Image: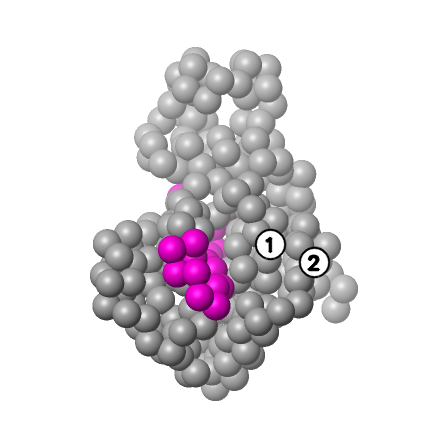
């Protein structure tokens, strides 16, 4: 198992860390995660993002479990994909059926020229395919290397705020947690987190106090953003060897 901490800076914006108890908690958790995974025999890689910039803000920690075998199908054009392209791809994956061009423009609100250009790029990247007049996504196993995407929000004491932020992350993550500074959250807090499907890490050993609900990937286009950031970085690293 390989864990890369903050190794993808050139791929996306990350917020400058604010020193204090919460960032100290984050660092201790990530160090513990690194130590744990050093002895793992899994073939997949765990890649750690600290405060990556996504459309809804800066989640404190995002851990992606990634299988780089999908890079066998990589094409350089994927470096040119925009958020709009990934939104379109995400919509195709959610529908899981062939869609007419007119149907897509009506639902997503893009004009036909803009949509046609995105579909052409996605097709060149082997992410969508056309059958007659209908378009659909390729099998996600051919390009989605992320098997698990864990989002974690750290709070020393404000459990309500942590829950709000962590629940927001369920839109793109397969598992969402709050990392709390308390040793053992009260039963009312744990019950509330379970109700919203959000997990809790707490205590000196970062025990999983509450298990989160698992969500299918991709949750939305943000999941695909992480996928492309990782893939682009891995390809770049391989080219530099």
Start-end of magenta stretch: 139-162
Q: Nearer the viewer, residue 14 or 41?
A: 14
Residue 86 visible in the displayed image:
yes
Which x, y percent locates residue 102?
Answer: 43, 13
Q: Is residue 48 left or right of residue 7?
A: left
* Residue receiving disc 2: 16
Crowding around mark 1 (Cα neighbors within 10 Å: few <14, some 14 to 19, many 20+) is many
Which residue is at a point 33% across and 63% down the rendered structure image?
199
Q: Is residue 230 above or below residue 20?
A: above
Q: Quadrant of residue 234?
A: bottom right
Question: CA separation, marks 2 and 1?
Answer: 10 Å
- The verdict on residue 187 being magenta is no
- The verdict on residue 141 being magenta is yes
Colour scheme employed for the rendering of this structure: one colour
Which x, y percent locates residue 29?
Answer: 51, 75
Residue 34 visible in the displayed image:
no
Crowding around mark 2 (Cα neighbors within 10 Å: few <14, some 14 to 19, many 20+) is few
* Residue receiving disc 1: 52
Q: Nearer the viewer, residue 62 or 137?
A: 62
Q: Is residue 27 left or right of residue 205?
A: right
């Amino acid at each position: 198992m390989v864990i890369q901490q903050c190794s993808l800076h050139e791929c996306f914006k990350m917020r400058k860390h604010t020193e204090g108890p919460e960032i100290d908690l984050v660092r201790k958790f990530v160090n513990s995660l690194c130590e744990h995974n050093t002895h793992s025999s899994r073939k997949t890689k765990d890649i750690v993002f600290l405060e990556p910039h996504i459309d809804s803000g800066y989640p404190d920690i995002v851990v992606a479990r990634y299988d780089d075998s999908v890079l066998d199908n990589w094409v350089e054009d994927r470096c040119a994909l925009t958020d709009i392209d990934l939104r379109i791809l995400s919509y195709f994956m959610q529908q899981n059926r062939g869609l007419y061009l007119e149907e897509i423009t009506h639902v997503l609100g893009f004009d036909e020229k803009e949509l046609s250009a995105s579909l052409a790029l996605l097709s060149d990247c082997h992410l969508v395919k056309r059958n007659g007049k209908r378009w659909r996504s390729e099998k996600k196993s051919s390009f989605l290397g992320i098997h698990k995407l864990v989002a974690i929000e750290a709070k020393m004491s404000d459990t309500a705020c942590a829950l709000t932020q962590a629940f927001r992350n369920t839109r793109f993550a397969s598992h969402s947690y709050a990392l709390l500074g308390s040793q053992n959250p009260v039963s009312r807090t744990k019950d509330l987190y379970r109700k919203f499907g959000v997990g809790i890490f707490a205590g000196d050993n970062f025990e999983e106090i509450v298990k989160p609900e698992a969500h299918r990937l991709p949750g939305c286009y943000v999941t695909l953003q992480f996928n492309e950031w990782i893939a682009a970085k891995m390809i770049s690293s391989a080219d530099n060897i």
